Every structure is written in structure tokens, then in C-alpha cells.
Image (cartoon, helix red, strand yellow):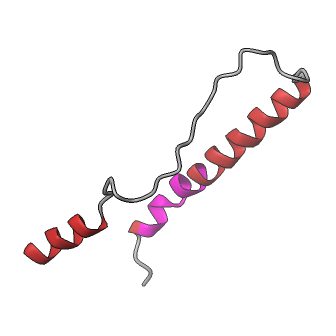
Amino acid sequence: MFCFVRVLKSTRFTPRQNVLTQRFYINSNSAKGRVGVLESVFVMAFISIAVLGPAGWILSNACDSHRKQP
């Protein structure tokens, strides 16, 4: 247990290390180009297929994993 705590303390961030400061700015200007309806529909369809496709496959095959083959 003590060895585990010692490893955690040695790998933790210490203020002595050099850190790059990242600054994120919110831009209040409008977008350079307008996003069309077709692009929006395409992206939403692609994301829903990418997320729900594998989830549906897993759920449809979940019962098969509980059955044992003779």
C-alpha cells in the first residue's frame, strides 16, 4: 500500500514542472460560411448511425451470448 501511494505522489503534477498555458477565447463573430440544411442532415444522420448502429448490434446479439452451444 505504501509503495502504491509513493508511486502516485511521484507521478502527480507538481508546480515545479513547466506547463504550457493554453488560453481559449470565445469568438463572438459569426461563422465564415453558413451551414446548409443538407449538411446538417448528413452530419446528424452520420452521427446517429455511428452511435446507434453498434449499440443496436450489441443489443440484438446480447441474448446469443447467454445461450450455450451444445
Q: Position of residue 54 (x, y in %)?
A: 61, 54
User: In the displayed structure, would residue 34 be above or below residue 7?
Assistant: above
Residues 27 and 34: in front is 27
Side (left or right) of 20 relative to 45:
left
Magenta segment main secondary structure? helix
Considering only vertical position in the picture, is 48 above or below 19? Answer: above
Q: Is residue 1 visible?
A: no
Residue interval drawn in magenta: 56-65
Measuring 53% from the left and 50% from the top, which residue is drawn there? 20
Q: Position of residue 56 (x, y in %)?
A: 59, 49
In reply to whether residue 63 is colored magenta, the answer given is yes
Q: Residue at x 78, y 15 (%)?
A: 29
Identified at 89% across, 23% down, the residue is 32
Q: Residue 58: say if magenta.
A: yes
| Residue drawn at 45 percent across, 57 percent down | 18
Expressed as whole percent of the image width and height from the top left, the position of residue 34 reads 89, 20
Q: Is residue 18 above or below residue 30?
A: below
The number of numbered discs placed on residues in the rendered structure image is 0
In the image, farthest residue toward the left: 2
Q: In the figure, 66 relative to 40: above or below?
A: below
Quadrant location of residue 52? top right
Q: Quadrant of the N terminus?
A: bottom left
Residue 49's spot in the image, x, y percent? Answer: 71, 44
- The answer, for residue 5, to whether it is visible in the render is yes
Q: Is residue 67 left or right of residue 47?
A: left
Q: In which quadrant is the C terminus drawn?
A: bottom left
Quadrant in the rendering for residue 58: bottom right
